[in-house]
Amino acid sequence: MTKTANQTWIILGATSSMARAFARKQAAEGAAVLLAGRDMDDLKLLAEDCRLRGARLAEALAFDARRPEGFDALVARMEAEDGLLNAAVFVGSMPPQAEIDADPSLIDGTITDSFTGPARFLQLLAPRMEARGGGTVVGVGSVAGDRGRLGNYVYGAAKAGFHTYLSGLRNRLTRAGGHVVTVKPGFVDTSMTWGLPGMFLVAAPEKVADDIARAVRKRRNVIYTPFFWRFIMLIIIHVPEMIFKKMKI
């Protein structure tokens, strides 16, 4: 991505490890970064870091996927900036499946955080992007959305829904010169995955941010990060159901 002063990125879930790394990369390119999340103190520190790295503007904004009444104000704040409007969605929550099994009410929050909340925000933003003739959406899903697995099928279902939503949004925004990148990370070193059993081939958030930035620059449609997860998931999705339902993965 070339250095430019007419790019504005809103980064939802900006305090996550992957989002921080991505925000810092955009700041170094001179973009404006609107850092949205729930921990305002942490966001303000990140905003200062981004300003020091070269961001044209860095601002902390309150965002909660479960409070859609605040979405209009965020979109209005974006509209106050000139140039292309971009969004990167790193929002999500993944309670252990055992906890969801014990308390099914946790399903609602998981799906809102990981799918319906971000989708609702993007629905508000999309016509503004179309009006300006471009812009990019980065939607961070998960390899968990490629097939329902015993260990996290509620989270996987939410991300599968988000993947499908992003595919449709990509179809829509392409007609107006925009683009949507669907990102499917494997295991990444984040607070969400800390302490989970069965972790392997864990990637650094900075590596994921590099892959996302490259995908934005090359207008890729769907990426797995690190890249080898594409081949891992190709195997997993082709395991016959009669065998797969007996596997403990």
Image (cartoon, rainbow, N blue to C red):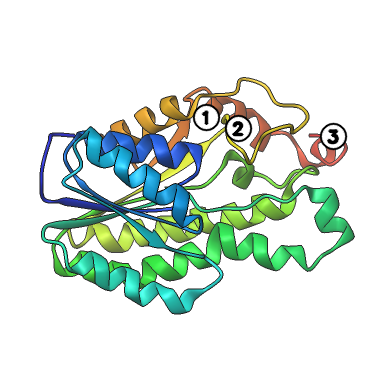
> Looking at the image, which is closer to me, 63 or 197?
63
- State how far apart marks 2 and 3 are (Cα): 15 Å
Q: How far is the residue under mark 1 from the one under mark 2?
A: 5 Å
Q: Which quadrant of the structure image shows residue 60?
A: bottom left
Q: Amino acid at mark 1?
A: Arg
Q: Position of residue 238 (x, y in %)?
A: 66, 35
Residue type marked 2:
Met
Q: Which residue is mark 2?
A: 233
Which quadrant, please, contains the N terminus?
top left
Which amino acid lies under the numbered mark 3 shown in the image of this protein? Lys
Residue 66's x, y, as percent?
A: 56, 70
Q: Is residue 120 placed above or below 111 in the rendered structure?
A: below
SS under mark 3 = loop
Disc 3 from disc 1: Cα separation:
20 Å
* 241 vs 174: above or below: above
The mark that comes first in sequence, 3 or 1, is 1
Look at mark 3 in the image and give the residue it sits on.
248
Q: Is residue 110 visible to us here?
A: yes
Taking the spot 11% from the left edge, 57% from the top edge, the residue there is: 83
